[in-house]
Image (cartoon, helix red, strand yellow):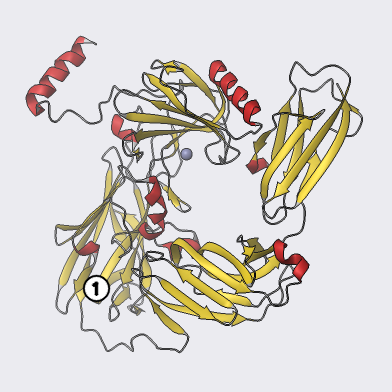
Amino acid sequence: MKWRAIVAGAIAFILFGSANPDPYPDDYFESPLGIPLYLAGSFAEMRSNHFHGGLDMKTQGHAGYPVYAAADGWVSRVAVSPGGYGNALYLSHQNGYMTVYGHLDRFSENIQLAVKERQYAEERFDVQMFPDRGRFPVLKGELIAYSGNSGGSSGPHLHFEIRDERTGWPMNPLLWGFDVKDTIKPRIYRFKVYALGTTSRIRLRDSRTGGWRIIEAGESAFVELIRYNGSIVMQCVDRIEASGPIGIGVQTHDFHDGSNNLLGQYKIRVLKDDESIFESVLERFAFDQTRFINAHVDYAERSSSGRWVQRGFVLPGNELPMYETKDEGVFTVTPGDVSDIDVQVEDAYGNAAGFSFDVFGTYSEDSSGIDESSEVYRWSHEELFTYRARGFTLRAPAGALYDDIQFHYSELPAFGLKRPVYSALHSVHDRVVPVHKPLSLEISAPDLPEELHDKAVIAQVSSNGSLSWAGGEWNGRSVKTSVRSFGTFVVTVDDDPPEIRPLNISPGKNMASTGEIRIRIRDGFSGIRSYRGTIDGEWVLFEYDAKYQLLRHRFENDLPRGSHMLEMTVTDNKGNTASREIPFTR
Ligand SMILES: [Zn+2]
């Protein structure tokens, strides 16, 4: 240990006592890359159905950079998969934290050998290993792998995580002081006002025309922000009036020095008359709660415009532990009130931006209330829910939704679709309302011929009439599946086998001048479930990259010279199988 560290440690001990050591010491972890650190993705940044679990470290657009152990420890898990983190390495450390390295091109030599051994033993590409503590010990800064683009990655980079080994929760790695330069404030583009109660109402006055825009109960509206004289002010709106409970949301991004990537913020705080009523802190989250992002953000806005608006209030069914609120961040505006609302956004380095506005309380005019049309059913998010109609059943567990809804359903005639279908269309509520837990759907298919029963599936219908796989099995009466979104559903069949397209091999070809076999595999509907490649009847390793639909076999040195037979079999999720035999020489 260096003297400086000992002195600093002694001072810290005197100041804070041993009970409160710095939980995130700056010198424990070092960067896993040997190149300057720039981020393409930040911790807990908003992604589809999940918060991002770590940092995406840029690798200058290329794969193959050495990846080093961030601290002393041991390899406790190795995973290989065609999607997700691709080739991933997990190190355990003495301090109770684990570091994760994802989308790797390959592992260091000894780990790679052990992986390959396991792949041949199990005769499969996607494998996992949990080595003993003594098997692959590593020192801080030791080469453990090479960066890549494997799995569900959209370009070469290193995905790096720090997890609390006790809970398995990922933590914000920037708390440990990685050498990332960030002196730039987050940018706040616009905010949204939500009329939350059944009698709430908001009015926005247009600063140019003086006209009012009315936001009725249950609705929301954007207010654009601009920078003016060094502060952030509302654009085109000069007065906000409201009555009843309201909430706000913001659309924001953070930026780091020397990079133009859009990153996530660390904190959002809402104050009303100088009192904090809402704070979200993206310090950590549980993987089994990551789908609550659909409650954290305005899911309907995301589904319709693609914008990520983070709520400054907590929906009733949102169980994320990252909030500190007063009344869940919802505040009630009463006549004559003037509330001063202050919104602050901060990044992990303490750079902050903010804006404020007043809300003037008015009397609410009698609103018509919720219309009670006959096909509307109240669905409480805290209770289980069952709905039955002709040829259709929906069952939902408690907690499937984040808030109560007035459920609506209708049966529609099926026409103009891009596949043959065997049931009516069932329009199930609204696709912009988020669903947390799987809903069980059962759709009867009276027109389905018996020989197609075991090929029957449920498909979700998009607005342009195209159908996408929603899974399902014939259960003797109808087709049953579980889904995690609302939308329009119908019964169709998948009896098409996958497609096998050899890219660099053909019958009789001499493969002596190439080091590998490349084959594209695709499935038109239900997707690839499994594949198996053999040469001369022996299983061989085909690496699978799902995003490129690509299978790759690198020739081994032990393949004898002469003629060989490649056999590839691919099966989709509905059990349809395709096979190809290709003789070749090498
Ligand atoms: Zn990532």
Residue 203 is situated, as x and y percent measured from the top left of the image, at 30, 77
For residue 25, above or below residue 52: above
Quarter assignment of residue 449: bottom right
Which of the pair 478/389 is nearer the observer?
478
Q: Amino acid at mark 1?
A: Pro
Q: Quadrant of the C terminus?
A: top right
Q: Is residue 518 visible?
A: yes
- Left or right side of 207 for 485: right
Q: Which residue appears at 51% of the width and 64% of the height? A: 485
Q: Which residue is mark 1?
A: 245
Q: Which residue appears at 40% of the width and 34% of the height? A: 161
- Secondary structure category for the residue under label 1: strand
For residue 21, above or below residue 413: above
Q: Is residue 503 visible?
A: no
Quarter assignment of residue 27: top left
Which of the pair 493/199 is nearer the observer?
493
Cβ(mark 1) to ligand 1 < 8 Å? no
Quarter assignment of residue 422: bottom right
- Left or right side of 495 for 30: left
Residue 574 is situated, as x and y percent measured from the top left of the image, at 69, 55
Which of the pair 498/354 is nearer the observer?
498
For residue 391, above or below residue 235: below
- Left or right side of 327 for 547: right
Residue 58 is situated, as x and y percent measured from the top left of the image, at 49, 32
Q: Residue furthest left?
A: 14
Q: Which residue appears at 12% of the width and 18% of the height? A: 10
Dot 1, how many residues are within 10 Å of its Cα: few (below 14), some (14-19), or many (20+)? many
Which of the pair 270/556 is nearer the observer?
556
Q: Which residue appears at 74% of the width and 53% of the height? A: 576
- Left or right side of 189 for 464: right
